[in-house]
Image (spheres, grey):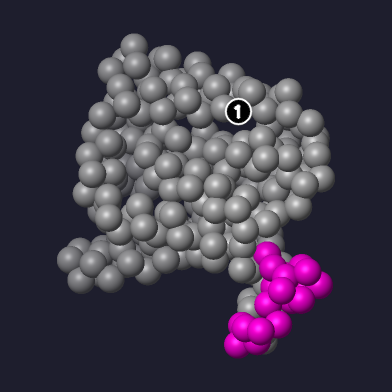
Amino acid sequence: MEYLKIIILAIVQGLTEFLPVSSSGHLALAEYILDIETPGVTLAVFLHFGTFLSVLVVFWKDVLKITGALLGNFWKVRKYPALMRNNEHFSMGIYILISMIPAGLAGFFFESQIEQFFDNIILIGIALIVTGTMLFLTQWVQNEKRPLNGWRAIIIGIVQAIAIIPGISRSGSTVSAGMFLGMPREKLAKFSFLMALPIIFGATIFKARDAFAAESFVWSGIIIGTATAFLFGYFAVKWLMAAIIKGKFYLFGFYCLALGFITIILG
């Protein structure tokens, strides 16, 4: 039964981490509705690491190019304006760093307050309705060609910080915000996934330190959970990329709205 619980939680984590339906909200609901208790912080850390690896595999070329551009040019402060205009991967890396600031501050200053939200099923339901409404509205947004810049990166970063609340989808809110700001869908989708990498990796490292120090764990369960989250996360990334490009992103809004109302009724 423990392995079955791990697999269920890993599937939920893998699918919902990147689909615009809120992984944190779904994990909380899975525990509440199915009476499944998450077996330790360590497993949660590795489930997130599995989804981190799935994005890394899908976008490994972009990650290498962006990392190389940042490391190779970061010290050239005086040349930043020219680099931002002429080096796509360097500018993308800078905008990713900018987008991290709001979420980093929110996690640092409000971690304990945010954790209390996970026990409030009604709040999770309301947050899912907010996510669903936001997704639904994107069907009327035109696929414009406005470029990513500093202030758009900050706005999307603020939205990502708000998505720490369970029920508010990180990918759903960041992609929706970018659409409302007039960014092209394919580049926006890629930016949304790439900007999640340092946040997920940083949170994994931060939590892993305490998890390894405080818990005993079985490696077989962790390996199964990580592999399952990776596999389902990989297909979720591919699926969402296709949905955004084809203009079908808003369809996830129906699911979030329905689940939100059901959650409030159950709560």
Question: Hey, which residue is sitting farthest left in the picture?
Answer: 214
Residue 185 left/right relative to 6? right
Above or below, 50 against 259 in this view is below
Image x and y of residue 42, in percent? 30, 60
The magenta-colored residue range is 74-92
- Dot 1 falls on a residue whose secondary structure is helix
**Residue shown at the point (67%, 28%) measured from the top left:** 138
Q: Position of residue 79 (x, y in %)?
A: 70, 82
Q: Which residue is mark 1?
A: 135
Res. 192 visible in picture: no
Residue at the extreme top of the image, as rendered: 265
Going 59% across and 62% down the picture, which residue do you hit? 96
Pick the front one: 246 or 75: 75
Q: How many marks?
A: 1
Residue 259 appears in the rendering: yes
* 224 with respect to 266 (left or right): right
